[in-house]
């Protein structure tokens, strides 16, 4: 390889966002360098509970990966959600006109599969073991990346577009001067994988809102279930001291929860006690950020993998084959930034706000309680939770009116029952 190879696109990071972008760009006929610091093609992200929301299913289908995920044992997901008003259960697949399910698939299965597909895409050159260290910049325009391999191996890779897909602590963003804005997260998280866990929900995922703590079970490929908790930060000492005991105690008091000591834990507990929300501007001349490099929020809602896939597709779709002039490319990068904002800013606002660990606000009490009582409200709730609809549709006047009507009807029938009970 020449020491100054030239490409149309240089993507830094060969995880979910980077591999998806490489596949989409490769398909447009672009020459793509896919730069990854990890040498191992079977490497994967460990700090992830890998619930991929339904919003990303169309992207997975277009990548040609939905079937591969199912063949690898990935579990179609939707969740039943426990609240103080009862369980919210989404209607069955057949009755809804949006992607009805996403996938639960362990990153140890998913990441190598994505990387292999990207590396086999025509036009994509996968460069494992190279770490992006510098950006090549001329007159304010980014035109490539300098990457360090093992020993003295160094590549100055020139590209018309550089894509930062290097995760939440993005070095590319840092080098480009796109500093992250941070907001605090009031919860901590711990999780582990179990085998032979008996779930009352079958293959459905479960989520418990305990106000402020949250717990989950996500059945995955190969009969393994992920068990997770996101307690309030005030409980950090208890969880740090013995996460297994804390998790077992928590699950003992949850309704319809599995009994953990009967199953085998097959991975060590992983956790984190400080995980702020991060967001950045997503483009500048010659450069775009996708996935966590652009936006990395509270893991409570399981949104990062889906948005990594979707933002990769939005970028490739906006750019197309705009290689003829930098002006045209930058115009399209602005269009990508606009799309990213319009798709995700509303979700971001609500997720950041809820991540403080505050109690449910009025709108959450209204919509969650109605969703526990009425299938139509449950459908709207699950369409929003799976990120298939945005905030505007979730809070549309007719949706709120129905929630109010459902709750009023419930209050009325409870009042009628009252004298009979006395
Ligand atoms: C506890 C936890 C639970 C989560 N659970 C879920 C969930 O249930 N569902 C969900 O959708 N999301 C979840 N997420 C979020 C999800 O893990 C991320 O959003 C997702 O991995 C983002 O993908 P990415 O490709 O943008 O970045 P990453 O997966 O972080 O990949 C970045 C890649 O860039 C490479 N890289 C970094 N720097 C360089 C460099 N300088 N040069 C070359 N390569 C580099 C890295 O090696 C890596 O391969 C969770 C996150 C956490 C912390």
Image (spheres, rainbow, N blue to C red):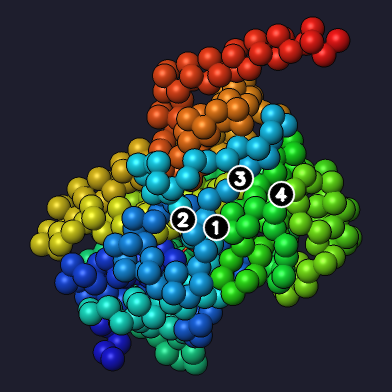
Ligand 1 closer than 8 Å to the CB at disc 1?
Answer: yes
Instruction: Using the rendered image of the protein, determine whether residue 377 is visible from the camera's viewpoint.
Output: yes
Does label 2 or label 3 sit earlier along the sequence? 3
Residue on which disc 2 sits: 102
> Could you give the CA–CA distance between mark 1 and mark 3, rounded to whole angstroms?
14 Å
Residue at 42% over, 90% down: 153
Residue 312: in sight, yes or no? no
Please tell me in which quadrant of the rendered image residue 5 appears.
Answer: bottom left
SS under mark 4:
strand
Q: Is residue 94 left or right of residue 214?
A: left
Secondary structure at badge 1 equals strand
Q: Position of residue 31 (x, y in %)?
A: 22, 75
x and y percentages locating residue 250 in the rendered image: 83, 50
Q: Which residue is mark 1?
A: 51
In the displayed structure, does residue 73 sit left or right of residue 198? left
Label 2 with label 1: CB-CB less than 8 Å: yes
Secondary structure category for the residue under label 2:
strand
Marks 1 and 3 in Cβ contact (< 8 Å): no
Dot 2 alpha-carbon crowd within 10 angstroms: few under 14, some 14 to 19, many 20 or more: many
**N-term mark: 1 or 3:** 1
Tell which circle, 4 or 2, labels the residue nearer the N-terminal end: 2
Marks 2, 1: nearer the viewer: 2
Determine whether label 1 and label 4 are within 8 Å by CB: no
Q: CA distance from mark 1 to mark 4?
A: 14 Å
Q: Is residue 285 left or right of residue 35?
A: left
């Amino acid at each position: 390889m020449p020491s100054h190879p030239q490409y149309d696109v240089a993507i830094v990071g060969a995880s979910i966002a980077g591999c998806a972008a490489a596949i989409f760009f490769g398909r447009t006929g672009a020459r793509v360098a896919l730069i990854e610091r990890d040498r191992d093609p079977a490497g994967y992200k460990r700090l992830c509970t890998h619930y991929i929301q339904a919003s990303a299913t169309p992207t997975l289908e277009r990548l040609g990966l939905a079937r591969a995920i199912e063949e690898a044992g990935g579990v179609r997901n939707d969740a039943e959600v426990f609240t103080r008003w009862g369980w919210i259960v989404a209607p069955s697949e057949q009755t809804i006109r949006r992607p009805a399910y996403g996938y639960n698939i362990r990153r140890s299965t998913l990441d190598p599969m994505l990387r292999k597909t990207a590396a086999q895409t025509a036009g994509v050159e996968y460069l494992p073991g190279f770490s992006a260290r510098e950006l090549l910049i001329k007159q304010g325009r980014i035109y490539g990346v300098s990457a360090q391999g093992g020993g003295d191996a160094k590549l100055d890779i020139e590209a018309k577009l550089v894509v930062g897909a290097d995760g939440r602590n993005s070095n590319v963003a840092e080098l480009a001067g796109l500093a992250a804005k941070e907001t605090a997260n009031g919860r901590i998280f711990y999780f582990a994988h179990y085998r032979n866990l008996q779930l009352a929900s079958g293959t459905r995922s479960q989520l418990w809102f305990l106000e402020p703590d949250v717990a989950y079970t996500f059945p995955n490929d190969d009969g393994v279930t992920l068990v997770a908790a996101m307690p309030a930060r005030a409980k950090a000492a208890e969880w740090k001291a013995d996460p297994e005991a804390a998790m077992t105690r928590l699950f003992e008091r949850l309704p319809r929860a599995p009994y953990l000591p009967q199953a085998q834990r097959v991975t060590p507990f992983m956790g984190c006690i400080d995980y702020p929300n991060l967001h950045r501007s997503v483009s500048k001349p010659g450069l775009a950020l996708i996935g966590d490099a652009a936006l990395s929020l509270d893991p409570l809602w399981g949104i990062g993998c889906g948005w990594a896939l979707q933002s990769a597709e939005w970028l490739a779709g906006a750019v197309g084959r705009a290689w003829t002039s930098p002006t045209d490319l930058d115009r399209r990068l602005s269009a990508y930034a606009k799309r990213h904002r319009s798709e995700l800013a509303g979700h971001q606002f609500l997720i950041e706000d809820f991540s403080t660990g505050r109690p449910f606000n009025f709108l959450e009490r209204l919509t969650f309680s109605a969703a526990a009582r009425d299938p139509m409200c449950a459908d709207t709730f699950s369409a929003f939770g799976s990120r298939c609809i945005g905030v505007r549709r979730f809070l549309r006047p007719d949706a709120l009116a129905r929630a109010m009507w459902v709750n009023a009807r419930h209050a009325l029938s409870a009042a009628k029952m009252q004298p009979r009970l006395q």
